Amino acid sequence: MMKKFGLLSVFLVSALTLAACGSDEETDGSSGSGDGGGGETYSVGIDTTYPPFEFEEDGEYKGIDIDLINAIADSQGFEIELNAMDFGGIIPAVQAGQLDIAIAGMSITEERKEVVDFSDPYFEAGPSLVVGADNNDIETLADLEGKTVVVKTGTTGADLARENQEEYGYEITQLEDSPSMFQEVSNGNADALIEDYPVIAYAIAQSGLDLKIVGDRLNGDSYGIAVLKGENDELLEKINAGLQELRDSGEYDEILDKYISE
């Protein structure tokens, strides 16, 4: 598993001020030249508050997910339009027909599989418990009794917090984006947060956040690319074929190494 993070210096300031969040903004981050273009154009939902997978820098969308979906589109001869929005609104937008594809560091869960179909997994992640850098009292969920845990709305971290709340006796605060969670703990307004390991490790390394990861990952998560359940089998086949081509050619590893190195 890739743990050592390098390149790309961007995070809190830009992410906290994203104008694109919650909008239907499109960028030039489209592709489709692999088979000469001229194929279908698909609307893709992303969450640009999620480095190293998705973020905005100098008005351009970047990250692992952005590079992957562009490479898949190029490989399979279709085009894409990127739409940035809050993470919690992405699956509802797919259900409403506003999006064809969702790629947003989205964990494959049984609950989500009731409304969307997922591609083959493209990244193995997992949520971690995070506290202030000077906090030596919290190491596990068992240390959270009477304390406040902040989570991001609509995520598996939020689900995990709710599932364990009664057993460990903590309060939960839900926020809409990762930078706000980080700020809440850094400011002492919350005792801990739950965030996917690669995201928080990248943020701490790149932005010098006054936070630290404690304990082991709380579970194992696999990220997948989603389409509307039962309605886009052909598109899902293209996505899986593109993913496999990227793995076979070595481009998949090149994309990950661009943002995360072992």
Image (spheres, grey):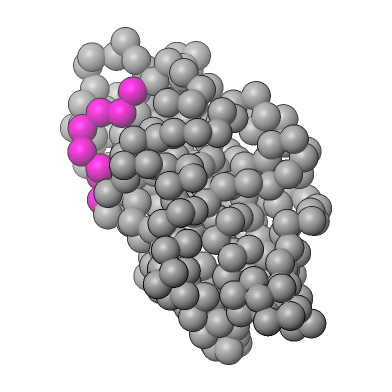
Q: Which residue is drawn at 49% across and 53% down?
A: 255
Would residue 65 appear left or right of 27 to someone viewing this image?
A: left
Was residue 217 drawn as part of the magenta stretch in this picture?
A: yes
Would residue 237 appear left or right of 163 to someone viewing this image?
A: right
Q: In this picture, which residue range is highlighted in magenta? A: 212-219
Would residue 256 appear left or right of 3 to someone viewing this image?
A: right
Query: Can you tell which quarter of the image residue 151 is in?
Result: top left
Q: Which residue is drawn at 21% across and 32% down?
A: 215
Query: Can you tell which quarter of the image residue 71 is in?
Result: bottom right
At which x and y percent is residue 83? Answer: 73, 57
At which x and y percent is residue 135? Answer: 29, 14
**With respect to residue 107, does 229 lie above or below?**
below
At which x and y percent is residue 142? Answer: 19, 32
Query: Closer to the camera, 165 or 126?
Result: 126
Q: Which residue is drawn at 53% across and 40% down?
A: 51
Q: Does any portion of residue 129 appear in the rendered image? A: yes
Q: Residue at x 79, y 82 (%)?
A: 38
At which x and y percent is residue 169? Answer: 27, 33
**With respect to residue 176, does 238 lie above or below?**
below
Was residue 221 drawn as part of the magenta stretch in this picture?
A: no
Query: Closer to the camera, 215 or 72?
Result: 72
Query: Closer to the camera, 217 or 164?
Result: 217
**With respect to residue 104, does 235 lie above or below?**
below
Magenta residues: mostly which secondary structure?
loop
Q: How many marks?
A: 0
Q: Does any portion of residue 118 appear in the rendered image? A: no
Query: Closer to the camera, 83 or 257?
Result: 257
- Name the quadrant of the C terminus: top left
